[in-house]
Amino acid sequence: MPGTLDPPEIRLRNECGLQLAARVWRLRDPMLAISSAPLGGGLGLRQWVLNVQVPHAYDGAEPESHLAALAAEADGASAFCGALSTPDEGV
């Protein structure tokens, strides 16, 4: 089925003394999506979704560059949307 999501890939990293998760959902085929994510937000074809946990103390000064750096590790070449959440929001 077009647009179907595979189960998320979970990536762990240490930041600010916490172990935080990032989840990557890959679409089998590009899908038209709408998002309010700080990176890749808006309306457009997306090939994957990134949701990254950040510490409660995250100042949010540069979410786009933070997400771009983490996305490059996962698959920075294709169209995606990237969002942030705190650990208790359960990415």
Image (cartoon, rainbow, N blue to C red):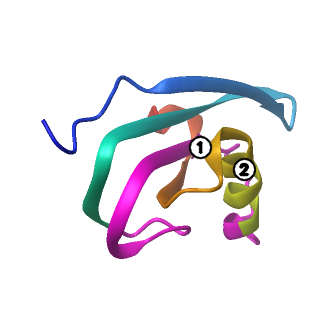
Front one among 49 and 52 = 49
Question: Residue farthest to the bottom?
Answer: 42
Residue 21 rendering spot, x and y as whole percentages: 62, 29
Q: Local crowd at mark 1 within 10 Å, few (<14), some, or many (≥20)?
A: many
Residue 22 lies within the magenta run: no
In the image, is residue 37 part of the stretch drawn in magenta?
yes
Q: Which residues are magenta?
A: 35-64
Q: Is residue 70 left or right of residue 42?
A: right
Q: Residue furthest right?
A: 17
Q: Based on the displayed image, in which of its 4 quarters is residue 69 positioned?
A: bottom right
Q: Quadrant of residue 17?
A: top right
Residue 46 spot, x, y in % from top left: 38, 59
Left or right: 41, with 23 as reference point: left
Q: Can you tell which mark lies on residue 72?
A: 2
Examine the rendered structure and indicate whether residue 19 appears above or below residue 53: above
Residue in the picture at 70% in, 59% down: 68
**Hey, what amino acid is under mark 2?**
Ala
- Tag on residue 52? 1
Residue 15: quadrant of the picture: top right
Q: Is residue 34 left or right of residue 79?
A: left
* Residue at position x 30%, y 46% in the image: 29
Query: Residue placed at 39% from the left, 70% from the top?
Result: 36
Mark number displayed over residue 62: none
Q: Secondary structure at mark 2?
A: helix
